[in-house]
Image (cartoon, rainbow, N blue to C red):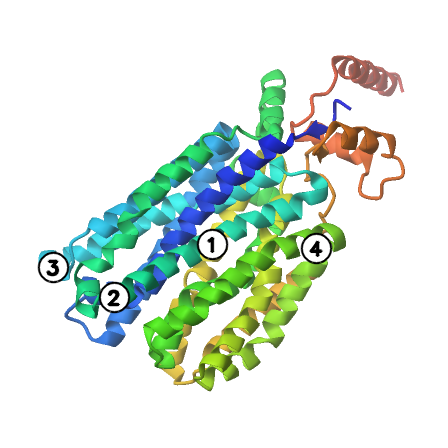
Amino acid sequence: MSDVTVVEKTTLKRAVAGTVVGNFMEWYDVGVYGYLAVTIGTVFLSDASPAIQRLFSLGVFAVTFIARPLGGIVLGQLGDRLGRQSILAFTLLSMSGATLLIGLLPGYETIGFWAPVLLILLKLAQGFSTGGEYAGASTMVTEYAPDRHRGFFASLLDVGSYLGFAFGAGLVSLIEFSLSPEAMTSWGWRIPFILALPLAGIAVYFRTKVEDTPAFQQAQNANEEQPGDADEHKGLISLIRDYWRELLMAFVLVAAANTLGYTLTTYMPTYLTTTLHQSMAQANLLTLPILLIVAACIPITGALSDKYGRKKILFIGALTGCLFMLPAFKLMERNESATTFLGLLLIAVPVIFFVANLASSLPALFPTASRYGGMGLSYNLAVAIFGGTAPLIMEALVSATGNVMAPAYWIMFTSACGLVTVLFLAESARRPMPGTLPTVSSQQEARDLVATQDENPDLDVSTLIKDAEENGTRTVPDGLKAAEKVVDHARSEHQRIE
């Protein structure tokens, strides 16, 4: 029983709420910026052509992701050493502060070239802090969640993400309906950014109510008793050396899933307005219901992964990413409201299956002592190269080829890479994560788990305990350590005599 971690429901709820609000804030900014991309290009590069303004605003969005790998590495390493909670509080304050300052930043007509320069610097600062957000949030919620329901609880992170995006996009749409185009360009665009301050206050309140995870605390306690044992996998070099396969699998899966995710959330407003020449209001009205549908369906696929396995659900996501894109973009090409909506819905299907299960699948690739760092490196590097640049890449492909179907081919390529990677992924549903002891939601569940451990297909007890001791989440009993010393001494004496 002492080897089983019991997380009470109230503690679990606080942990989930504290992580979800951070993802809400992160994607609120993404939604606001994505839906104001055209306006931001006009404000911060007012003397350029409309095409250059669009590419500038999308390029600035991509610049954010240049800083994400650095933030993921630095904050991930600190999160493994100092704790998940303190780093997540920092990321939240940094993200919201940068968002607020963007809303207060003068435009090109006021301060000239300093306007785009300062905008880029703020987005870089925002990207650095964001680099530790999703990696830390997914690490924290998966370490808190019971093994049997980890997929469901981890998927709630992405519910927060899409609700945050929908809220930001909906707020922008409401302001656009309420103001004239001139007022929107003059000052209206600032309102959603400035509102980040009160929203951040609410988010910080929830996040400070969350303590560090039991797995991290166990690793810290074990490291104090056995100094050095839990530090082996925390350094960046040793992380890459020991877990390069896991890092590579995580990188490809994130690249595939986030190409789809950022296409739906960030690129579609630009694609519908500039490539298909729909009005911004129409584009917003068509995409917002899709985002709400995605948010509502994500917990369902998370729960399905708990029942049927992560690999099957991820496989469906990658496969539909390959099969649904050509029909989706063909439907949108007809440029009618109904067909555009159906096309967006087809893009949403793989997102629901794919993106929703990253938060539970990726942290399970790494042991506790290296989990935040492994997630921070692999996730943010993939998002920087493929996710955040997806709108820029697809807009450039359309501009270069003149083919409105070019984005579909790019998504199909990344989804095919994800499909192959899923085949090599180890199943993690209903199992403790590497180096971690079982986690349950009640004392009765703990007793049942102990009583049925021998016939439980999801538990290999001897391997489980050995991994936990090696990774610092279980202290080797003093009696056992003494016995091992006696055995080792006897063995060495026997070899010496021989």
Cα distance in 3D space between marks 2 and 3: 17 Å
Residue 112: image tag: 3
**Badge 1 or badge 3: first in the primary sequence:** 3
| 320 sits to left or right of 333 | right
- Say what secondary structure mark 2 lies in: helix
What kind of residue is marked 3?
Gly
From the image, state whether disc 1 or disc 3 is nearer to you. 1
**Badge 4 or badge 3: first in the primary sequence:** 3
Mark 4: few, some, or many residues within 10 Å (few <14, many ≥20)? some
The residue indicated by pointer 2 is 39
From the image, state whether disc 2 or disc 1 is nearer to you. 1
What kind of residue is marked 2?
Thr
Q: Looking at this rendering, what residue extends furthest in the front direction?
A: 178
**Badge 2 or badge 3: first in the primary sequence:** 2
**Badge 2 or badge 1: first in the primary sequence:** 2
Viewer-closest of 483 and 70: 70
The residue indicated by pointer 4 is 304
The residue indicated by pointer 1 is 163
Q: What residue lies at 73% left-to-right and 34% top-to-bottom?
A: 438
Mark 1: few, some, or many residues within 10 Å (few <14, many ≥20)? many
Cα distance in 3D space between marks 1 and 3: 36 Å
